[in-house]
Amino acid sequence: ALLDVSSILPDQILLLDTYFYVVVHQGGTIAQWRKAGYADQPEHENFRNLLAAPMTDAKALMADRLPVPKLVECDQHGSQARFLLAKLNPSVTHNSDNYAASEIIFTDDVSLQVFMEHLARLSVQS
């Protein structure tokens, strides 16, 4: 599936493998809960498991690969989030009209959908 900017939500954890980087991105709410120490409390074992699952997957992706990719852990709106934002499909940009609850990418690139529509128009023109 295509990783899109609309995938970035406060309550989601994303895992991205770009061969040279493996990025684990935590949404804003998840990051706040982690910083508040909920994962360290015994009654929040499910949350601790939720945080551990993408790290386990990331380490499995990196285990047998040469060159070994760099592991990047980042939070929504954090400085390291640029590793994820640079690779996303920009379906919602600063020029879009429909950026309700989604993250916004400031880019002049077009989304894959716009590119495919333009390509389809060009292919049927005579």
Image (cartoon, rainbow, N blue to C red):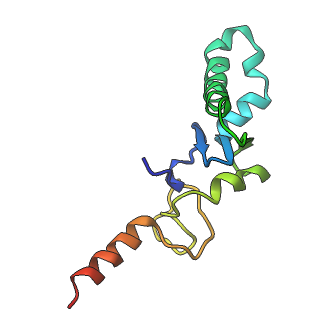
Q: How many marks on residues?
A: 0
**The C terminus: image quadrant:** bottom left
Q: Is residue 95 visible?
A: yes
What residue lies at 73% left-to-right and 35% top-to-bottom? 32
Residue 43 vertical position relative to residue 15 in the rendered view, above or below = above
Residue 74 in the image: x percent, y percent?
73, 43
Q: Position of residue 109 (x, y in %)?
A: 54, 73
- Provide residue 120's location: percent of width, then percent of height: 28, 75
Which residue, as the protein is rendered here, is positioned at the far top? 42
Q: With respect to residue 123, does 103 lie above or below?
A: above
Quarter of the figure with residue 66: top right
For the residue pair 74 and 126, the one nearer the viewer reads as 126
Instruction: Determine the residue positioned at 30% across, 83% down.
Output: 122
Depth check: give the residue in front, 22 or 33. 22
**Does residue 78 appear in this view?**
no
Residue at 23%, 87% in the rendered image:
125
Query: At 52% across and 64% down in the image, what residue appears?
Result: 90
Residue at the extreme front of the image, as rendered: 66
Q: Considering only vertical position in the picture, is 69 above or below 30?
A: below
* Residue 40: quadrant of the picture: top right
Residue 20 in percent (x, y) is at 68, 48
